[in-house]
Amino acid sequence: MNFKIDKRQKVDLILIAISAISIIASFILSISYLSWIAIILCGIPIFKECIEGLITEFNIKADLLVTIAIIASIIIGEVFAAGEIATIMTIGGFLEEYTLSRTRGRIEELVKLTPQIATRVKNGKEEQIPVEEVKIGDNLKVLPGESIPTDGVIIDGQTSINQATLTGESLPVDKVKNDEVYSGTINLYGSFTMKATNTSEDSSFQKLIKLVESSKPENAKIVKSADRWATWIVIIAFSAAILTYLFTGEIIRSVTILVVFCPCALVLATPTAIMASIGNLTKHGILVKDGESIEELAHVNEFIFDKTGTLTYGTPEVTNVVSDNKKEMMYLLSSLESKSEHPLAKSIVKHYNNNDLAEVSEFEMLIGKGVKGKINNELILAGNKKLLESENISTAYDDQPTNGETEIYVSKNRKVLGKVVLADVLRENSRQTIKRLKCLGIKTTLLSGDNEKTGSYIAREVKITNAQFNCLPEDKSKYIKQRQLKNNKVAMIGDGINDAPSLRKANVGIAMGSIGSDISIDAANIALINDNIEDIPHLIAIARKTLKIINLNIAFSLGLNIFAMALAILGVLDPIAGALVHNIGSVIVIIYSSTLVNFKMSRKDYMKPKKLGITKSLNKPIT
């Protein structure tokens, strides 16, 4: 993920720099015509945008009053004031544009993952065809390591499949005859023949791509802070200017009113606060793509978690070893599993953490069951309970896993030595994160592609009561849409490709930065670079604090404008002094916004959420 400034923004920066230099030079050298450089470079784009908005949409924005103030200043000969206004407004506009939402989805990366070729079996012959030519009912052969070209049902063979792209499951799923398989998932080991039940265009993976392309929040609409007040500002300024001229007959006072009511500080109110908060979050390893996300996050009342790779580490780990002779069993098991590329095998070898492994001969993968081989001419079997049953080997370790763990039994010369238990382990800070979010008045939800047994165990451990399991990408997006249609603001955090549609559909999408896929990161608005979910409460807190400061900035800016207008009506301010008021207001807004850079949420804030703008009762259910 990158935040490089594009070519157009580079040009804007150059024009702003030239304009600023010309204004400074004009002030120091007392050469007023130098200010025309700023008027031309920064003023003309403002004029253009104002005219286009009025003609095409009759949309009154802050640009209209800025245009009037610049033109009025030029008419009365205050070229310096006109150039200064144009430059300040352009700087504010640039900051706001830079921090506004630029939601992206790396759709082309998904397309690259889409299978392009399928092997069709027809009349006993194999032929490779473009995946677009696959028809429902075609028999397709899939080899180890290949992506499954379309949805279908296995008619011959068995295998293990990595379904993470669709379900986010951390472990491969064993598949046998009559089991369903899905496009875009990876065939890990065995070759098999399948019957296509969908064309490639209607496959599960294409549905995922379409979801990412079309997903957007149902009720997210952030408007520039200055534009929210633009219509009223224009009405007030024009009315005051006209009335002042009618009562005093002094055009200079009327022009000064238009100048002082130019919303310079108001335009800076939002972008300066958001830039400061983004700087704060960057220090915590949180990267924010757009300022809109900060404003949206401040209103979030429900936080949705994916399970695998988010609340858990996303990789299976050995959690228990059961044996009368653990040392011998782990030595034999690790030696045998070192020949396998299965994720469970790699976890076992990693847990054993010893390079002193035995030589293995006659190694064989038993798809859907386990592995076998000989060590010192002794037959070693390692696999699930089905493997032992198929070999007529009884086990003394027959207790069933209760929390979705995976058990690997080990036998030597047809005698059970014990078993190893593996599970996707809960992150150390998951419980604390959920607890703190609840203290902030936020509802927590778990949407997992895993089975109910595994998912419900994690939900109980972190005390999430609202949980759904066996969720496909469209199920997660559908849930988010339903919540949004009930006027809820939803944030979603995930790490896999399957989470990308949900991350885009949510009001705010947050991706796990180091372990997450590029697609999920690009679909999200925010990324946790260090995968530290404990930073999420801080993220919520600073978003709320930022919105509070933005609102105070706006109130101050409007108050300053009204006060300056009163002075202009009384003839106390002239256009040059009015331009100075712009500078003072802008500086105060920038200084106040900069306090966010060092914002840090204390433990007391969790117990006193009203300090952060939370008014909803923590005991009141969210609809």
Image (cartoon, helix red, strand yellow):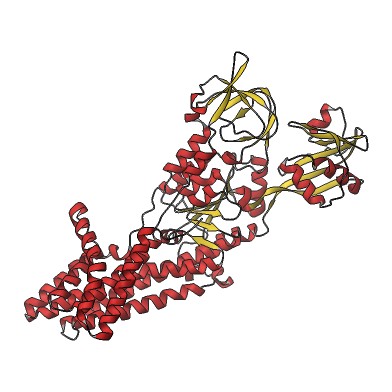
Q: Residue furthest top?
A: 123
| Residue 169, horizontal then vertical, whole percent | 63, 42
Name the residue: 56% across, 64% down: 285
In the picture, measured across the screen, residue 390 lies left or right of residue 546, that is right
Q: Residue 490: x, y in percent?
A: 47, 52
User: Compared to 496, does 442 lie above or below?
Assistant: below
Q: Is residue 171 left or right of residue 320?
A: left
Q: Is residue 383 left or right of residue 454?
A: right
Residue 517, x across and y down, in percent: 57, 48
Q: Can residue 92 be seen at all in this image of the molecule?
A: no
Please state which of residues 178 and 521 is positioned toward the viewer in this rendering. Answer: 521
Q: Nearer the viewer, residue 360 or 383?
A: 360
The residue that appears at 15% across and 76% down in the rendered structure is 255
Q: Is residue 21 at least partly visible in the picture? A: yes
Vertical order, 543 against 566 (above or below):
above
Please give the count of numbered marks on the rendered protein.
0
Depth order, front residue of 81/292: 81
The picture places residue 84, in percent across and down from the top left corner, at 26, 76
Quadrant in the picture for residue 579? bottom left
Q: Is residue 123 above or below residue 224?
A: above
Q: Quadrant of residue 156?
A: top right
- Looking at the image, is 89 positioned above or below residue 54? below
Residue at x 45%, y 70% (from the top left corner)? 276
Q: Who is closer to the viewer here, 534 or 58?
A: 58
Q: Quadrant of residue 586?
A: bottom left
